[in-house]
Image: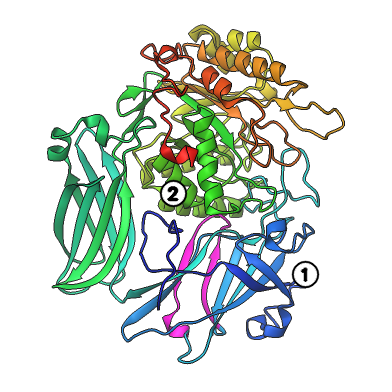
Amino acid sequence: MPGVELPLHPRPQLARDQWVDLLGAWGFAYDDHRCGLDQEWQNQPDVFDRTIVVPFPPESPASGIGDTAFHPVVWYRRTFAASLAESWRLLLHFGAVDYRASVWVNGQLVATHEGGHTPFSADITAALCEDGDQVLVVRAEDDPSDLGQPRGKQDWLPEPHQIWYHRTTGIWQPVWLETVLRAHIVDVRWTPDVPGRKLGLAVAFSVAGDALCLRATLRLGDRILVDDMYSVHGLALQRDITLERAIASLDSDLILWSPEQPSLIDVTLTLLQGDRVLDVVRSYAGLRSVSIAAGRFLLNGRPRFLRMILEQGYWPESHLAAPSDDAIRREVALIREAGFNGVRIHQKVEDPRFLYWCDRLGVLVWAEMPAAYLFSPAVAVRTVKEWIEALHRDYSHPSIVAWVPFNESWGVPELPQSAAQQQLVRTLYHLTKALDSTRPVIGNDGWEHVVGDIITVHDYSFDSSTLRARYGTSEAVERTLHQIQPHAHAIVLDAQSRRDQAIMVTEYGGISYRPDPAVPWYGYGTIADQDTYLAKYRELTEALLDCPSIAGFCYTQLTDTLQETNGLFTEDRTPKLDLALVRAVNARPSLAVPGEVMAHMQDVRGEVPWMPVSPMLSS
């Protein structure tokens, strides 16, 4: 079956050249009375009385529907052509369906999945008809009133309130088809080992065939680093690929991944049976290390001050779904253009294409689990299951440098008093470390820490003197951690043991630029003119840069989002301030990293050396 070549594969680290995009117009129906299963709507084409543009959620204008009312169950239908040669298989992939999905092909149930932010796939070969179009039907259940559902910042009230937004129901990430042989590559995983000068490769296969071999070809630009052949025995293969010879012949900074030099090793994996090619996938990896030592964040063994910005990943026209491939690339470019070296993705498991551009353009990422809003054993199971899937999907992205399973005790609202909730936070921390020992983990970002590699604080103090008093010396920091309660929450609970964790202020600022007092707004302090806005941003940011015990910050936030008007950019991504001036503020050296000498090293274009401008940024 011929594929459609698009600029970027929906799954960039396991991509095949031939794939079929299933986005676009689908039939659509609301099932407010939940009768579709009993009436077998998967076999009733007449009930699909609307048209929706996938992958945009029905609440969004881009979907062509734009209905933000409560609709707990929705159905989708479309047809596609498929004609498979003998021995070929057809795989159906979903990037994400919020929240509980059932999928039929030609009336046969082929997949079910729970979890609104993580992918799933199905081999649909057995369900295909020999002649005519194939019928694909999806049922999505997304109950707005279910506060035990990991939902992030999707509102459970009819209209967005405070810091919560319109819902994103149903299909909101790519849907696509791939043809494969029975023996094919199912999964690829990369583990960088900078001290060992190697990359760990783990590959999973669909079957344990006879006389199979895997060829791995690694390139840095036009240069071949490795071209190895491995015998395949069983359903999985693990190998350490040594790069010592390549590193010895290159400047190590050219091969190590970092924001200033986001070097990616492009990989072609070819599954062979003798001379016969069974499967070819494209992947990539980044060689870099991340660690915490003596209160500092280390990248490739060197202290690095994190200058991050909070990313809601929400668009007014399409909600959590990105409006286009170019919008995803541009979102990452904006972070770079504003002079930040990192992004904290907030209450969302981001699209893999967003992470691809962070990998490609050099933006450090904190990845966070969307929260539920109540606690129970069932909610704990839901959260753990979906978090494991997110970890598995995104493990190989070099840009991800920290995992955040909880934020501000959302989903564990009685954390200080509840032993069960404290154990859940500890469990997810240790489970995350067990599944990925290469990255730091923040148990509960913001406050009420019981475990974690980084102690993070959310502090929206609107004057710099307060920030300096709280974080200006190591003694002040210790007093703040144990005695000060920003937002009336203890930062460190009694059970938290202080080791050599780094300390970061991972939400601050939140300045609302409101030149028109009649415009509704939500922020943590209001500014009426641009000069005062820039001055306040400089004041707060420089206060944190001048605190020697603070290892990084995260400014709130990148863009306005509905009633939250505290972005550096408007909802349509228009900057509120001259980005060169914002970059200059962010370029100031941090006293926490004495080796930082940046302000006088700016080039003629005004970019700082640790944040070079890629040619992609001006395209």
Tell me if 310 is positioned left or right of 159 in this view.
left
Front residue of 259 and 287: 259
* Residue 461 belongs to magenta span: no
Identify the magenta region.
Answer: 108-127
Residue 521 can be seen, yes or no: yes
Front residue of 210 and 226: 226
Disc 2: CA contacts within 10 A as few (<14), some (14-19) or many (>=20): some
**x and y, in percent, of residue 367 in the image:** 49, 41
Disc 1: CA contacts within 10 A as few (<14), some (14-19) or many (>=20): few
Question: So how many labels did they put on this image?
Answer: 2
Inter-mark Cα distance, 1 to 2: 34 Å
Residue 32's label in the rendered image is 1
Question: Residue at (63%, 22%) from the top-left corner?
Answer: 459
The amino acid marked with disc number 1 is Asp
Q: Is mark 2 on a helix, strand or loop?
A: helix
Question: Residue at (41%, 16%) from the top-left corner?
Answer: 598
The image quarter in which residue 236 lies: bottom left
Residue 391's label in the rendered image is 2
The image quarter in which residue 89 lies: bottom left
Image position of 521 with respect to 321: above or below = above
